[in-house]
């Protein structure tokens, strides 16, 4: 009788384990693995939001997102240290060549539109609009501007404390090209950081400070920052960055697309495919706007998906 009961109990236990295993398998995603992302601090908020939502749906995939600047992201992609690089500028020819030397090919996917945002302290009530030429006078190489009064007559005779992205940043490259006229050429006596939160803290803590970074960081911190509206010339209307002005192209000259890059051979991996599909989905597009960027036209996301194997 004891053996009979034992066998009966074993059968019930075995059945329970099988049923539990089947149920468990039905609720887990088929993908598993590790996805490493690094690069642009501008792209970081989107990738981070997408990663969090993706991992909630795919429990067996771990996605880590870091920020070190677009150039450093490309270096890590070339070295095979990451699967996806965030970039606030297109890949350079020398980076394409470095990938080819490793037998690799980069795949470019735009993910959103951004407007580089010039910010000032909330107590600054004089520089709420500026011309491109005035911004150039401040940021160009060998600038003689030291005080706000050097920019425009009647502004305070107080030193300007400047904050901006480091030289590895795609935002630095784009801003210097659009404002100074030459990419990667800028005055050096400013506080640089690849972490835009450091720039936010600097500008928000000093009445006479000014800085620039991606629109998302302004949206997240607009209660402690003022935005500078930009005039392309003296006769033009001043335009502030917003979802509307970035989308319709009237925020000039600092609107630009931002990207993610991966290696073509890596796109064969199921977890990478599913992550990129989620990134380009309607939910991914909504997350881009939720963190303060402008979603692309739907057909651009569809073109990205055609790049998958």
Image (spheres, rainbow, N blue to C red):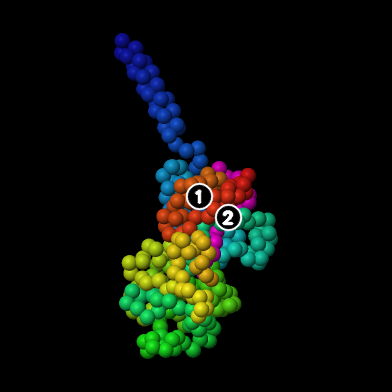
Q: Which image quarter is the C terminus in? A: top right
Q: Which residues are magenta?
A: 254-270
What residue sits 50% from the left and 42% below the top? 32
| Identity of the residue drawn at 46% across and 55% down | 288
In the rendered structure, does residue 246 fall within the stretch colored magenta?
A: no
Residue 35 vs residue 147: left or right?
A: right
The percent coordinates of residue 90 (x first, y second) are 59, 63
- In percent of width and height, residue 131 lies at 49, 79
Q: Are marks 2 and 1 in contact (CB under 8 Å)?
A: yes
Q: Quadrant of residue 222?
A: bottom left
Percent position (x, y) of residue 5? 32, 14
Residue identified by numbered label 2:
109
Q: Is residue 19 above or below residue 120?
A: above
- Which of the marked residues, 2 or 1, is nearer the chain's N terminus? 2
Instruction: Determine which of the numbered discs, if any, sits on residue 169 in the image.
Output: none
Secondary element type, mark 2: strand
């Amino acid at each position: 009788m004891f053996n009979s009961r034992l066998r009966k109990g074993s059968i019930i236990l075995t059945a329970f384990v099988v049923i539990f295993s089947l149920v468990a398998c039905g609720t887990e995603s088929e993908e598993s693995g590790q996805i490493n992302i690094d690069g642009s601090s501008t792209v970081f908020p989107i990738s981070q939001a997408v990663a969090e939502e993706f991992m909630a749906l795919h429990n067996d995939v771990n996605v880590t997102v870091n920020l070190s600047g677009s150039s450093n992201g490309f270096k890590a992609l070339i070295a095979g240290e990451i699967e996806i690089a965030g970039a606030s500028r297109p890949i350079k020819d020398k980076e394409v060549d470095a990938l080819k030397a490793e037998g690799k090919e980069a795949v470019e996917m735009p993910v959103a539109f951004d407007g580089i945002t010039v910010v000032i302290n909330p107590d600054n009530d004089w520089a709420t609009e500026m011309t491109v030429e005035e911004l150039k006078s401040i940021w160009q190489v060998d600038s003689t501007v030291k005080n706000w009064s050097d920019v425009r007559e009647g502004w305070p005779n107080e030193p300007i404390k400047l904050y901006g992205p480091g030289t590895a940043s795609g935002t630095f490259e784009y801003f210097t090209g659009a404002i100074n006229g030459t990419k990667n050429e800028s005055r050096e006596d400013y506080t640089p950081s690849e972490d835009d939160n450091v720039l936010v803290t600097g500008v928000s803590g000093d009445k006479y400070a000014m800085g620039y970074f991606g629109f998302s960081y302004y949206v997240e911190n607009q209660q402690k920052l003022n935005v500078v509206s930009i005039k392309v010339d003296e006769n033009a209307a001043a335009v502030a960055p917003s979802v509307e002005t970035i989308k319709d192209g009237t925020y000039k000259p600092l609107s630009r697309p931002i990207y993610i890059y991966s290696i073509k051979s890596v796109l064969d991996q199921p977890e990478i495919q599913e992550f990129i599909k989620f990134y380009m989905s309607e939910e991914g597009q909504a997350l881009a706007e939720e963190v303060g960027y402008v979603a692309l036209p739907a057909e651009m996301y569809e073109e990205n998906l055609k790049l998958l194997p």
